[in-house]
Image (cartoon, helix red, strand yellow):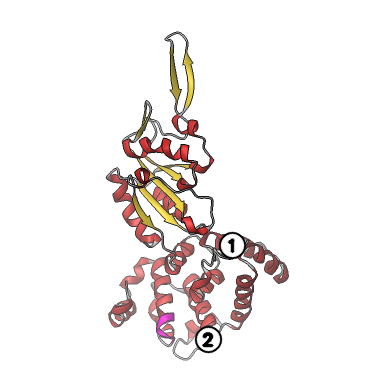
Amino acid sequence: MKPSTIAKVLPKLMASKTSVFLWGKSGVGKSTVVKQVANELSLKLNDVRLSQLDSIDLRGFPCPDLKAGKMHWLPADFLPKETDPPGILFLDECNAALPAVASGAYQLILDRAIGSYKLPDHWAIVAAGNNVGDRGVTHSMPAPLNNRFIHLDFEIDADDWARQAQKDGIHRNIRSYIRFQPASLHDFDSAINPRNFPTPRSWYMVNTIYNDGYSPTETFEILKGVIGEGHAAKFVGYCRDIASMPDIDSILLNPDEAKLPGSQAVMHAVVTTLVDDKTTTSNFDRIMRYVARLPREIQVVFVRGATTKDEAIYQCPSYMDWGLANQDILI
């Protein structure tokens, strides 16, 4: 399931008090989607890494009441109280938990309670874990625990990632590169088990490095340590190639005759720059005259980027004309 679809269905599933388990490769953005949903719904988020807990941590801490001759259990501070605002209890790295911790989670997940503690009605449970075959630290989840979840498989989708990255201000060169080379978004071979490899999460790290003013040689060497040498070389080469990008202002001045990019790589860079720096509702129709001269798949990249930036673009005459002519590819 695409991240955007998960973000759409998760609020409904949580409202029904159904526990959801998100499965996916390391670094694909499972926790990011949960945080996104929490932010959009103004929910508090308690992020609990089950892999870091001991069995007693989940139940609470024993506290003797010598006067009453009883033992009370003080709930852990990550378990929400009735007085807390609505929120999500996010049990991350769930299948990396020790078997004793997983067993302790049974009651909390199924009955929304553990021992004397009860999860407030205005809180939802969402869990996540890495796929078993991806060489992460995982344990086989018992069938009774599996049966307590709705399991959603987290897909890696370059279009979804690019839309979110645009909203998050990721550098245009990174976003246009991923549009141009979507296979570079996530590349992990469990048989080789590389030390560094690209993931949706690591490209956000690339953004920080790219914006920190390193020299080209320094940038390449550092990127090798984030996404691996092969992908670092491809990305640095891409950035070098797009230096020949046509003058963007000339496109606005003469969209019908302005120079067209000479390669697919530069086309991606041009339309991404147009979206970021130039496109508004007042000039969209004019820019679309230039974009219409480019291959259809590049037109799609531009239109999706422009409408993500400003939904008012949907009302522009040239968008409506383009949409009618390209109904088969609009999803």
Image height check: is 179 above or below 120? below
In depth, the one of 219 and 71 nearer the eye is 71
Q: Residue at x 31, y 55 (%)?
A: 9
Q: Distance between the residues labelled 2 and 1?
A: 38 Å
Q: Which residue is drawn at 36% across and 71% down?
A: 313
Magenta segment, which residues?
294-298
Point out the tag, 2 or 1, that comes first from the N-terminus: 1
The majority secondary structure of the magenta stretch comes to helix
Image height check: is 21 above or below 271? above
Amino acid carrying mark 1 in the image: Asn
| Residue on which the image places disc 2 | 261
The C terminus - image quarter: bottom left
- Position of residue 289 in the picture relative to residue 14 (left or right): right
Residue 242 falls in which quadrant of the image?
bottom right
Image height check: is 163 above or below 139? below
In depth, the one of 99 and 323 nearer the eye is 99
Q: Residue 18: x and y, percent?
A: 30, 45
- Position of residue 222 in the picture relative to residue 60 (left or right): right
Image depth: mark 2 or mark 1 in front: 1
Which label number is shown at residue 193?
1
Q: Residue 328: x and y, percent?
A: 29, 79
SS at badge 1: loop
Amino acid carrying mark 2 in the image: Pro
Q: Please indicate, yes or no, whether residue 128 appears anywhere in the rendered image.
A: yes
Q: Residue at x 33, y 39 (%)?
A: 110
How many labels were placed on the picture? 2
The N terminus - image quarter: bottom left
Q: Residue 153: x and y, percent?
A: 39, 58
- Position of residue 278 in the picture relative to residue 327 (left or right): right
